[in-house]
Amino acid sequence: VKAGLETFFRSRWVDRPRELMELDAGALPAGFRAAGAACGIKPSSRPDVAVLCCDEDECTSAALFTRNAVVAAPVEVSRAAELTRLRGVAVNSGIANVGDGAHGVEVAHAMAASAAAALGVDVARIAVASTGVIGVGLDRDTVVAGIEQAAGGLAREGGVSFAEAIMSTDRWPKHATVEVPLARGGVRLSAQAKGAGMISPSFATMLCFVETDAAVDAITLGRLLRAGVERSFERVSVDGQLSTNDSVFCFASGSSGIGVRPGSEDEVAFATALDALLRQLALEMVADGEGATRVARLVVRGRVGAVDPAARAVANSPLVKCALHGADPNWGRILAAAGQAVPDARPGSIDLSVEGIAVARGGTAVALSEEERRRIEEAMAQPEVDLHLDLSGGDDEAEIFFCDLGPEYVRINSEYTT
Amino acid sequence: VKAGLETFFRSRWVDRPRELMELDAGALPAGFRAAGAACGIKPSSRPDVAVLCCDEDECTSAALFTRNAVVAAPVEVSRAAELTRLRGVAVNSGIANVGDGAHGVEVAHAMAASAAAALGVDVARIAVASTGVIGVGLDRDTVVAGIEQAAGGLAREGGVSFAEAIMSTDRWPKHATVEVPLARGGVRLSAQAKGAGMISPSFATMLCFVETDAAVDAITLGRLLRAGVERSFERVSVDGQLSTNDSVFCFASGSSGIGVRPGSEDEVAFATALDALLRQLALEMVADGEGATRVARLVVRGRVGAVDPAARAVANSPLVKCALHGADPNWGRILAAAGQAVPDARPGSIDLSVEGIAVARGGTAVALSEEERRRIEEAMAQPEVDLHLDLSGGDDEAEIFFCDLGPEYVRINSEYTT
């Protein structure tokens, strides 16, 4: 534990488990090695290829991929791998390897094969992931040479190097390592992620890799990962666009000798730590969204079936996002976006509050005091803004995190590349 | 007919009926009078209130309103009016009259009442509409005085004055008058509309008013209006946001003495002219979308149930819209947006063309010749860009028109107003 380090769990919307110890982000849990390298895919010469491996043959894994019908070649190749017993993953940034037909699939296969050869494991136990420019072919020899180079530099302390090599237009790397005390001792969890923003033109791909030295059976690992993703990456939106490359991988080496059994208290502690990690990473992605200057959390309350569409409609409304950019508590746009998504909403019973201060009651503007107006103005200018929308008609709740829409998003995404 | 006038039907995507004669846009069909006035709602002192009336007691009408659950007070009041026999409408721009509770409804009622009194007709036969800033109360005395002033200036030639007074941040007024030759003589059709863009902060409200001197029963008029709106205003998107104020009104005075009977050839000619009018007006709205510099038409072909969601997902994708702004034929973003909306799409059989030149076949980039590349580059920089997406799996088609997303949209919609 590095004393004096700022906590990774910076957002007020993430409950940092009290027992958690934060460790050096670069140090992976026992049984894992990683490395990043630069092989020339990115014109900037920054790191653009990375390998992560688990040295335990008995390790378990779980993976989740984009729901988009149009998927990148690496997603196609990874889906066909042995996803419950993966031994490693080879990743490149700079080029997304989408829409390149049979050639793209061949290159993704070659990435897996070269990592498998370097690690001495069956190719079926290697996954691949890519992020970056689309519509550009990924050169096979370049990326294979890069993977070989990265595989040659694999180290237990390679977490930061790995996290930096998977970045695209991310403004900062996203990684953490924590230790979770369980009944029989501590287990460690590391995670590296990259978020929304890439070399233009691009998709807003998210990739996340999680490693633990706990022993967790593949079914439990898959269940915990799905639940954690549901409460983190599934609750954020930069621009409402589902990438063709989104992938989340979780590996359990078992190297600590400490097992996490389904239904145990240890499982609760482990899941809580995993949740906090994924949730903070998801918030980092929103905060680092293309051109983003602030993040809003919106909690919608109402009937089952209405709250989630309303939350997503507000989070993806360009009018709401522009208002957030302008630090403008434009509640009318929030009500209108919700009303578009939930045609049976009763506007006369919709309430909205900003940082706990009611701004609309029964669909009508609240007459604010000078003090309230000042507090809302201040709150809207902060990096995190909290909004609560009550549609009435039920007690179900949906939460969503989204960033603002500023001119920088347009600049990043409208630049012409040839 | 003004010889030498440029045609109103400027878009290549609108078939101008050959027999149609274009008349002075300001001259309304027989039986109608209109006027705009400035009453001080807009800080700019521009015209901000307008009245349209039909002088025939036997006139028929039809109306369509936003599907948003959250509606403006004027929509609430208009919905309760006698929508098949309206005699007129009172409109204001500058303030949208949304979210002002009982006061807003009272003001909307007062608008109808003052127009009814000035015209000497039952208040139940007067509709109202508003567009402009939200979250600001509309002063009753101001708007009522404006309506009285406008009603005092009503004239057969008031079409342009009316169209100008309903503008918000529209860069140009949208209006036309045409004559359609029917079997027993010509009937006239006028229309005035306003589109996306308003004093910030705002919704992207669209309003449209259509007048004809043909005699059309209310059921037929409603059917023709719904069909025309389905092929025009329902097929456009500026930012995917459904306004709380959207309203379309159609009035038939019967003053020409020429009837349009259901099932007749005259009905086809009349409907064709109405369609062309509404379609061009809808395209004007997209072209005049907030910050817009160009319009794209996307035709999606595929199985029933897939084409419309795919078309709307592409049209509302901020990534696609930014690429359009940058004149970038970024076909990967179009495929990704369609794949997000249609999870069972088979990417390996998706084709995309730009101006008839294939850029992707079977989900894979086509190797373009220098000549093709140059032609696409030129086409993307034009004010109108034509895109065809074939998802395969069926022969259903959906068409949508959308504008680009530029920094000006963000500027307009993120400015803080107090």
Image: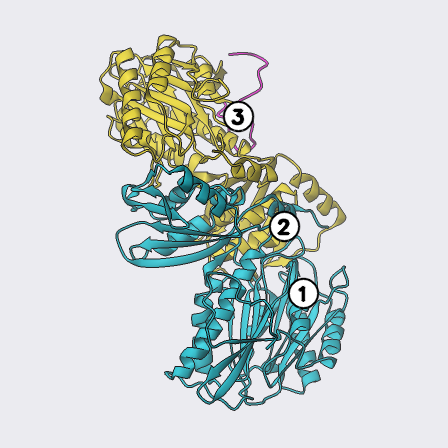
Chain colours: A cyan, B yellow
Q: Nearer the viewer, mark 1 or mark 2?
A: 1
Was residue A220 drawn as part of the magenta stretch in this picture? Answer: no
Q: Are marks 3 and 2 in contact (CB under 8 Å)?
A: no
Residue B392: tell me if it is visible. Answer: no
Percent across and percent down for residue B185 are 38, 14
Task: Tell me the kind of residue under disc 1.
Answer: Ser
- Badge number at residue B9: 3
Q: Secondary structure at mark 1?
A: strand
Residue B40: tell me if it is visible. Answer: yes
Q: Main secondary structure of the magenta part?
A: loop
Do circles 1 and 3 both sit on a common chain? no
User: In this figure, which residue is indicated by the disc labeled 2?
Assistant: B330
Q: Is residue B178 above or below residue A251?
A: above
Within 10 Å of disc 1 (Cα), the crowding (few <14, some 14-19, many 20+) is: many
- Badge number at residue A93: 1
Q: Nearer the viewer, residue A267 or B159?
A: A267
User: Residue at 31% across / 21% down in the picture?
Assistant: B111
| Magenta stretch bounds | B1-18
User: Residue at 47% across / 33% down in the picture?
Assistant: B418
Percent across and percent down for residue A197 are 61, 56
Chain under callout 3:
B
